[in-house]
Amino acid sequence: MNLTLRIFFGIVDLIFLLVILNMLKKKRLNLKYTLTWLFAALALLVVDCFPQIIDGIMNLVGVASPVSMVFVLEALFVLVILLSLTAIVSHLTERVYRLTQTIAIMEKKIRELEEENNKEE
């Protein structure tokens, strides 16, 4: 990869990191959800600074082309992010289910109290 392209990707990656940190600072993202994005951005920055890492992984795995190796690594990052988001959605779904049950119980108690109050009058 030529130097101009590496500098371009480095600048884009730094902008991406700044956007992530800015969203974290403004509390648009929660820290535990941001860690996956930060890890991905830092890994991209390291690979951009040291492209021989791709060559080493490529030789280790047996992939013939650096472009193919980059696509394999990209697919792995996407899978990690999807798994992370799926875990978050599953957790939030469970919380919504519990909150819905709690609200239903509270509404039932309110109705019972209102009925008792109406009987006393």
Image: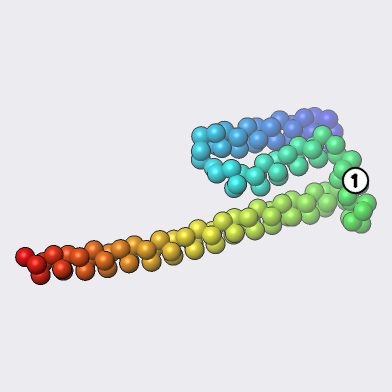
User: In this rendering, is residue 63 above or below 45?
Assistant: below
Give left or right: position of 12 versus 5.
Answer: left
Residue drawn at point x = 38 percent, y = 66 percent: 101
Q: Is any atom of residue 107 visible in this view?
A: yes
Quick one: 116 or 2, which is closer to the camera?
116
User: In this rendering, is residue 3 above or below 35?
Assistant: above
> In this view, which residue lies farthest toward the left?
121
Residue drawn at point x = 30 percent, y = 63 percent: 106
**Label 1's element?**
helix
Residue drawn at point x = 77 percent, y = 30 percent: 7
Mark 1, Cα crowd under 10 Å, few <14 / some 14-19 / many 20+, is some
Residue drawn at point x = 21 percent, y = 69 percent: 112
Estimate the x, y position of residue 27 in percent, counting from the top left.
51, 38
Quick one: 16 or 108, which is closer to the camera?
108
Residue receiving disc 1: 55
Estimate the x, y position of residue 43 in percent, counting from the top left.
76, 42
Instruction: Specify the quadrant of the image occupied by residue 89.
Output: bottom right
User: In this rendering, is residue 44 above or below 64?
Assistant: above
Quick one: 7 or 114, which is closer to the camera?
114
User: In this rendering, is residue 114 above or below 13?
Assistant: below
Give left or right: position of 106 versus 91.
Answer: left
Estimate the x, y position of residue 62 in percent, counting from the top left.
92, 57
Quadrant assignment for the N terminus: top right
Quadrant assignment for the C terminus: bottom left
Instruction: Specify the quadrant of the image occupied by residue 114.
Output: bottom left
Q: Amino acid at mark 1?
A: Asp
Instruction: Specify the quadrant of the image occupied by residue 19.
Output: top right
Q: How many marks?
A: 1
Estimate the x, y position of residue 70 in percent, counting from the top left.
80, 49
Q: Is any atom of residue 71 visible in this view?
A: no
Give left or right: position of 99 versus 31.
Answer: left
